[in-house]
Every structure is written in C-alpha cells, then in structure tokens.
Amino acid sequence: MLFENENDVLLLRLKDDTFKHLLSDAIVFARQKIGTEYSTTEARLARLEKRIAAKETNRQFCTRFVAQAYLNAGIQIVPNPDYCSPNDIQGSELLIAVENALRTASDAEIRFAQEESPLEKQREIHNYIFENARAISGQDIQTFEQLSKYVLENPDKDNEITNIIEKSGYLEMWQGDVERNPWHYDYKELLKHYTNPRQRKEVGYFFATTERETRERFFQTLDALEFGYSFYAQRYYKVQIDLYKKLIDLSETREFVGILSLTK
C-alpha cells in the first residue's frame, strides 16, 4: 500500500501472541463482508460516548469492520465494536504499534501502485452483483452468504441471479492474476522474471508456505457451495463450484512452483 505521508498510517497488532490462532476467524469474517455498503450515518454515530447497539446491522464503516472482525474471533479490542472511532482502536489495551513498519517506495513501486488495482476491480464486480441482486430480490443483500440464502429460498430466481454473476466477470477474475503474474504459475517464467536467486527463493518460500492455508479457505467455501447445490442442483451453485475447483488447482500450481524454486 502507498501513502503520501508517514503520519497517515499506523500499523497495530495484538500484544498477546496467544490470540494468534484466532486470527483466521477474523479473516473469514472480513472476507464475508466484502461488498458490504458503507454507512456514513453509522460512522457518525461512532462519536457517541454512550453504549448503543448497531442501528444498521447490515452496513459497515472502517473501524466497525475492524472491531467486529476481531470480535467474531472472540477478541474484543474496544468497548463497543458496533460504534468505535480510530482513536478507540489506537488506544486499545490489546493492541500495540508496530515500529518501523513503513519505508520509502521505489519509483518502480510507485508506478506499480498507480496501475489499475485488482482489488478495485474486485470491488466493482461485487458492487455490480449485489446492486442487481438487491434490485431483483427487493432485499438488502450485502454479502454472498446472504445471496446464497436468497437463491436457495427462491429457486425461480436462480437463472436471473446466475446470469448477473456470469456477466459481472466474477467467474473470470482469476485470469487477471495469471496474465499479470505468469511467473507464479510457470517455473520457467519465474526464472526469467526473478534473475536474482535470493529474490526468487523469497517468492518461492512465500507460495510454498502459504498456499495450503489458502486452499483450506477455498475448500471451506467449496463445501458450503456443494451443500447448497445438493438441494436443487441450481446453476448459481454449480458455476461457483467450478470456480472454486479452478482456484484450488491454481493454488496447487503456485505451491508447486514455489517448492520447485526452493529445490533448484
């Protein structure tokens, strides 16, 4: 991530490493909330000192998103996760600032950061899907979990919702990474891209040690999709089952390339 000034960002982490095993639950929560609409009204209410429950439970803003993610993992970092400010999080007794977390970006890194962001493209795709899903359903659908429930309960909307997903580009998002980073999927490309052996091994080590966890997350989603598919064999579930099987294959390829780079 690129920032104009070093005072614009503060990196915090948990003081107690015994909570580390719970962080995967926080990450799952965060991924489930991708696409949820931002509420300016709810963010303003975070200034209130009194303890109140969320008025718009199906909306997010930055500090609520962080605090609720931790709470979902059983870690309450602020008194009121529904309404909290940046100062509340910064002052949390459970968090500590990470020293020397920033460095000056190189010219190449600045150019890279200014290119079209895959995350921004992902956000646009998710917004397209959920905006159309809300129009079709008349419901306040903000996440894929909510959308899956709606399709399961309304089989007659299966094709209409699935057509939106297919049109959005959601099922082809993985192609962008393969095109941008072919060296993640082909060892010969890796050798050409990373001529420095040390750098090549660093990249290889990352994929060799993280892809198993990535696949575990994909398998969890795949299990849920296959369970949904077992009821009515809906297209909505089938296209996503095929997608996650592909994502698992790609993860295995990245891991293989990573391991190969460490052995040669």
Image: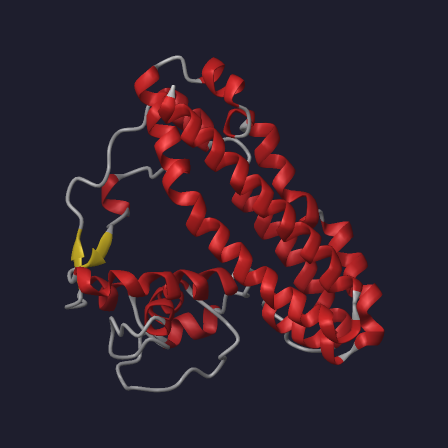
Residue 119: percent from left, percent from top: 52, 45
In front: 22, or 59?
Answer: 22
Q: Residue at x 54, y 57 (%)?
A: 219
Q: Residue at x 48, y 13 (%)?
A: 192
Give the answer, above or below, for where 64 lies relative to 199: below
Residue 173: percent from left, percent from top: 64, 43
The color scheme shown is: secondary structure
In front: 122, or 114?
Answer: 122
In front: 17, or 163?
Answer: 17
Quadrant where the C terminus sits is top left
In this view of the protein, can residue 117 be seen by the observer? Answer: no
In front: 217, or 158?
Answer: 217
Q: Residue at x 21, y 62 (%)?
A: 90
Residue 2: percent from left, percent from top: 36, 37
Give the answer, above or below, for where 228 lies relative to 254: below
Quadrant where the N terminus sits is top left
Residue 227: percent from left, percent from top: 65, 71
**Quarter occupied by residue 3:** top left
In this view of the protein, can residue 158 be seen by the observer? Answer: yes
**Quarter occupied by residue 68:** bottom left
Q: Residue at x 55, y 29 (%)?
A: 185
